Image: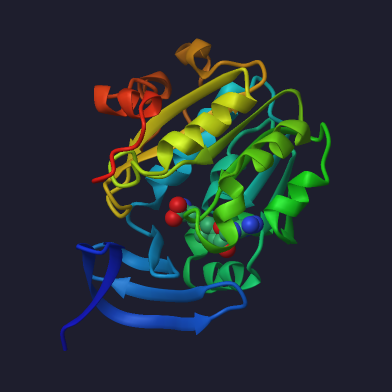
Amino acid sequence: MDVWFYEEHKQNLRLNYRVKRVLAHKKTDYQELVVVETENYGRTLVLDGAVQLTVRDEFIYHEMIAHVPLFTHPDPQKVLVIGGGDGGTVRETLKHKEVNEVHLVEIDPEVVAAAREYFPETSAGLSDKRVHVHYADGIRFVAEQEGAFDVIIVDSSDPVGPAEGLFGKQFYADVARALKPDGLFVAQTESPWANQDILPRIYAGIRATFPIARLYLATVPTYPGWLWSFTLGSKKHDPLTVDPARIPDLGCRYYTPELHRAAFTLPRFVGDLLEKPADPFA
Ligand code: SAM
């Protein structure tokens, strides 16, 4: 049997994966959820046709979305993760000894249930006693907070469906209010290669809200374009002034103290993209 799953990226481009087995396929209240075992990347979580994580390369995204902000803040005690129902970001967050409270706000309980069943290495941290799981819309949850968090991590799906509002200016203003006076936040901000139509607008929204806004990159093979971006918005602490000698070894496979700063060094086309209108042919 020759079974393939594809992620339709644009009308004229599809990414294909040879599938060994389909483990789950259901329509939740929010999205279509699929878990497949692929030949190259192992178990893979797919929401509304978009790959969210694979067991083979999830460490890259989760280490980079968690450790860059958490090592930029000098004392990150209270952390909010929005989205991220697979638990990977929470797992990395818990590696920081200063962290004593993590709130995960995931809109779809079925994602957490699937993660617990099919991705135990990714989701194990969700049972840690420091972690509080809320099944709620992150947009509404954040709007109700004030001065509560040291670090907010927006580990969302793409800006369509329930995640659309997580990329809006109003949401960024609410995030700023939910943070403590020296708080900072990071969001996954799509691919500077594959999403040139939306990245400049997302970055501009964060830059207009926070005194410090910095975009950084990682290579994630199973996300469209491979090259992936994260944007950090901060009230006070600048990721570029972190001393690498102060960063302990957490045994990461992608993140290193040197990479903490290097990830902010942008290829010219990415820097240009942040300043110019989007390329209509991207
Ligand atoms: N790393 C992933 C990526 O970029 O493909 C994101 C992974 S994580 C599974 C994304 C999660 O965000 C999903 O489980 C989805 O249900 C959740 N989500 C989407 N919109 C949300 C919202 N408004 N509030 C809370 N969670 C949301």
Residue shown at 58%/78% (left/top)? 28
Picture coordinates of residue 81 (x, y %)?
Answer: 64, 46
Q: Write down the quadrant of residue 96 in the picture.
A: top right
Give the quarter the ligand 1 occupies: bottom right
Specify whether residue 251 is in view.
no
Q: Farthest residue toward the left?
A: 2
Picture coordinates of residue 176 (x, y %)?
Answer: 71, 31
**Side of 230 where 84 appears, left or right:** right
Total marks in image:
0
Nearer to me, 156 or 282? 282
Residue shown at 66%/15% (left/top)? 236
Please tell me whether residue 136 is drawn above or below residue 186 in the rendered image: below
Residue shown at 54%/40% (left/top)? 187
Q: Write down the quadrant of residue 45 in the picture.
A: bottom left
Nearer to me, 221 or 15? 15
Please tell me whether residue 165 is drawn above or below residue 119 in the rendered image: above
Q: Farthest residue toward the bottom?
A: 1
Picture coordinates of residue 251 (x, y %)?
Answer: 43, 35
Please tell me whether residue 200 is drawn above or below residue 54 in the rendered image: above
**Side of 134 where 28 appears, left or right:** left
**Side of 156 where 109 appears, left or right:** right
Picture coordinates of residue 155 (x, y %)?
Answer: 55, 48
Specify whether residue 25 is in view.
yes
Give the position of the N terminus as an image quadrant: bottom left
**Side of 11 where 70 appears, left or right:** right
Give the position of the C terminus as an image quadrant: top left
